[in-house]
Amino acid sequence: MTGQYGWKVGAPPPVLGEHSVAKHDIFEQYVGIYIERLTRTPGQTMLNLTLVDGFSGGGLYRRDGSEVDGSPLRLLSAVEAADKVLKATRAKGFVVRADFFFIDENPQHIAFLKDLLIKRGYRSRLEQDIFVRCAFFEEVCPDILVHIQKKGTAHRSLFFLDQYGWSDVRLATIRTILGTLRNPEILLTFAVDALIDFLSVKTVESQALLKIELTREDVRALMNLKTGEGWRYLIQNGLYRHVQDRTNSRFYTPFFIHSVEAHRSYWLLHLSNHRQARDEMGKLHWKLNNRFQHHGGAGFHSLGFDPSCDLRQGLFTFMFDDDAMKRSEAAVLAQLPRMIHDASYDGEGLPVETLFAGNCNDTPVTSDILSRQLALLRNEGELVIKTHDGSTKPRAKTVSWSDRLVLPRERSLFSRLGW
């Protein structure tokens, strides 16, 4: 998000906003989680990875009287830390073969970043595995996709697209990334409050709205929601559906970072095509619980728009704290019996992965929360959990993705609920 910041060689770096601290924390910590998840095979000795910072800025800020690293240096540091741990713990050695692309359209920002990287000891790696580009992200994206494809068939890649507003990255570009590569993940900043303020039928033909593929009919439908209490949340609900539909992402997290300075909220959208990636990002939001908000309910389907219900009646600010965890667990416990019953799976039962993957997008629920509530239902005799080979798990505390869920013949809980 470089639009509000400026860098110039020889001048002090800009002051880092508090809301940007949360983003940089997510970026750095998710890289560590990502590498750890992909290197769990004991005999593995190498991981190919590409990290793309599409709006890198100059890479350095001031905060509380001190200089602090920006996203380029924090991404480099995260990979180096993970690589060091793997080298120390693997008998056969390990190497994380990571390439980095740092992109900004402002020549002064790029000059500052190159100077910073050289001062930090990265001179020999420039144009080897660290590529700094003065360009718009969308101009160099095709070449980056080719680079990733040439590295191997897995296409492991993370795109950090910290745009300043909501139209610097076209939804078509994200669609291309997700459709071209096998395993990309995208972390996209999206200033949804600013977009809502911009929306009107008069502005529908603007180039910015065309980039996110909002038609006149789309804008009119969203504007029709602008009545009564909670209308902003209703429009946000429609917009994140639009983003998911137009990017073709199978999994996403539409959670918010609230900017105290700007008195606005914006999305940090995580888009991917893999259930595990979505689950890990959800867990990280819970870990960093004082930075993020979720505008919706506590259980499954908490963001889904049901035209038969008034979404505003159930709206509250969900802060990923202890109270939110208790509400989430209670909601999931109440929802699961009906969800499993309605799945109407064959006699072998409903796979846990199928249950989670089919319902995880519209919720702050993670696999950990789901696993605990499934075990509780099993312990109360309301559910039977079987392994993939058909044996029962009467006492195990953990639930695996391949486990299957079977309804018992005696459904005391179901009968109490009137089923």
Image: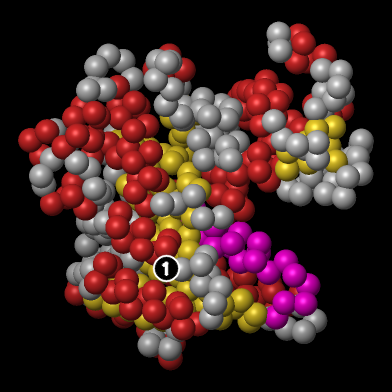
User: In the rendered view, does 160 fall on the left or right side of 107?
Assistant: right
Q: Quadrant of residue 163?
A: bottom left
**Residue 38 painted magenta:** yes
Residue at 36 percent across and 63 percent down: it is 176
Q: Which residue is mark 1?
A: 180
In this rendering, would 52 be left or right of 226? Answer: right
Question: Residue 53, image x and y in percent?
Answer: 38, 67
Closer-to-camera residue (281/389): 389
Residue at x-position 46% and y-position 35%: 293
Disc 1 residue type (three-letter): Thr
Q: Is residue 415 above or below residue 168?
A: above
Residue 310 place in picture, x, y as percent: 40, 15
Report crowding for label 1: few under 14, some 14 to 19, many 20 or more residues within 10 A (C-alpha). some
Whether 1 is drawn above or below 133: the answer is above
Q: How far from the left and from the top, in percent, is residue 75?
A: 47, 67
Is 42 on the left or on the right of 338, as rendered? right
Quick check: 278 left or right of 40? left
Quick one: quadrant of the C terminus? Answer: top right
| Magenta run includes residue 72 | no
Q: Quadrant of the N terminus?
A: bottom left
Judge by depth and name the residue closer to the eye, 203 or 14.
Answer: 203
Compared with 26, 292 (above or below) is above
Q: Name the residue rendered at 50%, 35% in the picture.
A: 362
Give, as a single range, the part of the protein colored magenta.
24-45
